[in-house]
Image: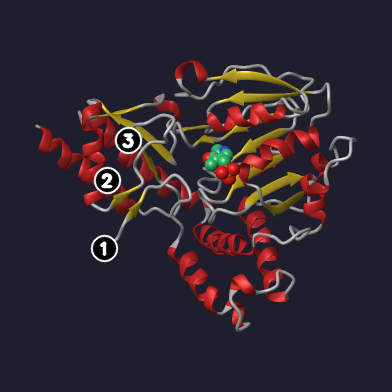
Amino acid sequence: MSKIHNFSAGPAILPQSAIDASVEALQNFAGTGLSLIEVSHRSKEYEAVVAEATQLVKDILQLGDDYAVAFLQGGASLQFDMIPMNWLGEGETAAYTNTGVWASRAVKEAKLFGNVNVVASSEDTNFNYIPKDYTMPADAKYFHCTSNNTIYGTEMFSFPNTNGVPLICDMSSDIFSRPFDAKQFDMIYAGAQKNMGPAGTTLVIIKKSFLEKRVSKKIPTMLDYAVHIENGSMYNTPSVFAIFVCMHTLRWIKSIGLEAMEVRNKAKADLLYAEIDRNSLFTGTVAVEDRSRMNINFVLTNTAYEAEFLKFCESKNLSGLKGHRSVGGLRASLYNALEIESVQSLVDAMKEFEAMKK
Ligand SMILES: *Cc1c(COP(=O)(O)O)cnc(C)c1O
């Protein structure tokens, strides 16, 4: 079978080493003679997987013992509820930016628990930029932002000074794509299936001093971050397969390093944006300074060509380029594991399509 170039927004492309290790472990996990999906999560071989995945996150982000890491279930979407449930008491206020569908959903859920101050929103222009001018309310229990807006293709390349307000970020679609100072965050979370592993687990990273500031009210056990952290992601049966794939993906990320990962990702994004800007048939949809390196949104200037172009791409083994159903157009997701050769193939197809329409 010839190579399929996978531009899917998520679940998405993973490093071949993680896929090969998974195939092997499905047959015989760590020499146990059992499949990874039929082995006890309490076996010493599997406990070592969770321990290594947890340590790799800390190593890659250079975090010490003042941070806790856990792998949870329920997706990034459950974090939209768990965060206010753990840190926002009735009558208290949390600050949010509204920069896309996922951010809007986070706002919606937080409102079930307390007051939400949406300090900035780009909704008026269909989320095509990252708002940067806003004031941090001093009374906020925390400030929540989304570093990469997967559906719209905007990305935050710097984070606001919160003046002591705890900083929480949904990094589902750009975590581990470049170096950043993780220590400025009180909490980071990311669904695995965009840039870190398969669907089924969500990474949470929490500063221990912030964990201690949870609401005084009783939190349902499964929704209490402290319970999952105290139990090493093993309070209940974890997502055994997903965490295993994450561990192998994290090994690969660590072996490359975040500095080199950024160089790779920037080269890929620059290559595609340059073609979008050069090619008369295509137009980028977001503010140039906020262009995401992970999800690149663009449209055909003549929308009548869209279906034909997507079909043309399919014939060239270019997969997953249709924009999200809520925005339409095209979206190329260039996550960590995508090679620059795949981006070059897309660029070549765009050039060929332009020549066909001349
Ligand atoms: C995909 C995505 C989500 C939702 O993730 P689920 O794991 O499906 O709940 C949330 N936030 C961002 C930024 C995403 O890209």
| Marker disc for residue 317 | none
* Ligand 1 lies in quarter: top right
Image coords of residue 333 (percent x, y): 40, 43
Q: Reading the chain from its start, which is encountered first: label 2 or label 3?
A: 3
Query: Which residue type carries mark 3?
Result: Tyr
Residue designated by label 2 = 346
Judge from the rendering whether residue 193 lies leftward or rightward of residue 350; answer left or right.
right
Q: Residues within 10 Å of mark 3 (few under 14, many from 20)?
A: many
Q: Reading the chain from its start, which is encountered first: label 2 or label 1?
A: 1
Residue designated by label 1 = 2
* Quarter location, residue 107: top right
Q: Residues within 10 Å of mark 1 (few under 14, many from 20)?
A: few
- Quarter the N terminus occupies: bottom left
Image coords of residue 132 (percent x, y): 56, 21
* Disc 2 secondary structure class: helix
Q: Are marks 2 and 1 in contact (CB under 8 Å)?
A: no
* Disc 3 secondary structure class: helix
Gap in Å between the C-alphas at discs 2 and 3?
A: 11 Å
Q: Nearer the viewer, mark 3 or mark 1?
A: 1
Residue designated by label 3 = 273
Q: Reading the chain from its start, which is encountered first: label 3 or label 1?
A: 1
Q: Residue at x 9, y 32 (%)?
A: 358
Judge from the rendering whether residue 286 lies leftward or rightward of residue 163; answer left or right.
left
* Disc 1 secondary structure class: loop
Q: Residue at x 55, y 64 (%)?
A: 248
Query: Which residue type carries mark 1?
Result: Ser
**In the figure, 13 relative to 322: above or below?**
below
In the displayed orientation, state which residue is furthest to the left.
358
Image coords of residue 279 (percent x, y): 21, 32
